[in-house]
Amino acid sequence: MLDANASYDEGGNILTGDKCIWYLCTNEKVGYIFLKTQAYAYEIKWGLGQSNHKTIKKFIEILQQENLIDDKQYAILIREISIAKTLGDMYEIPNYLATIQEGKKWIPKITPTKRKMQLMVSDVTGKLEETGYKVIGADEYGRVNDT
């Protein structure tokens, strides 16, 4: 996926090198990917705060399985997904870019935004379970629904 060009330093200068796939793996929004081939229709969804590298990797694996990308493209995308995994939070992308551009080693951390999202999801999940709903994560949903 192409550079997003959506990251800026504290002075408002653009930081180049951020990939769209990083945002897809690390945002806090609800998401949905749909792919229809001649043989199958694939649907991958995630809820608020559930975006992660595993979900996007699953989609990339489908693209490879359907021969829509070659081995070289697959390797590039998997490498970018592994970077997104270390970021964990899209708001860390500018810090990551600035750190690597300075030649320093990136040390991942959980940001206040990510922690806030995790706590909110946990709180809502707890309240739903208290009222009798069964709450399952995206990974379990995929296994149960064979997606």
Image (cartoon, grey):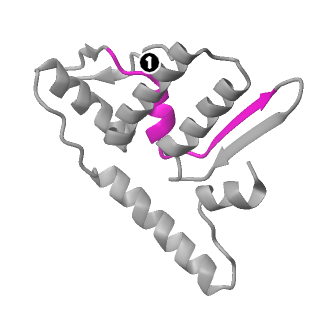
Residue 49 in the magenta stretch? The answer is: no
Rendering coords of residue 73 (x, y %):
53, 15
Q: Residues within 10 Å of mark 1 (few under 14, many from 20)?
A: some
Q: Residue at x 51, y 17 (%)?
A: 1
- Outermost residue toward the front? 71
Q: Is residue 126 left or right of residue 63?
A: left
Rendering coords of residue 52 (x, y %):
49, 45
- Outermost residue toward the right? 38
Q: In the rendered structure, which amino acid carries the disc numbered 1?
A: Ala
Residue 89 sits in quarter:
top left
In this rendering, the answer to whether 38 lies above or below 47 is above
Q: How many marks?
A: 1
Query: What range of the chain is rendered magenta?
Result: 17-36
Q: Is residue 102 left or right of residue 144?
A: left
In this rendering, the answer to whether 81 lies above or below 9 is below
In this rendering, the answer to whether 81 lies above or below 85 is above
Q: Residue at x 37, y 59 (%)?
A: 116
Which of the pair 13/4 is nearer the observer? 4
- Provide the residue designation for mark 1: 4
Residue 26 in the magenta stretch? The answer is: yes
Dot 1: element: loop
Rendering coords of residue 125 (x, y %):
56, 72
Q: Residue at x 61, y 56 (%)?
A: 138
Rendering coords of residue 105 (x, y %):
14, 32
Which of the pair 7/134 is nearer the observer? 134
Q: Residue at x 29, y 37 (%)?
A: 92
Q: Is residue 93 left or right of residue 57?
A: left
Which of the pair 124/101 is nearer the observer? 101
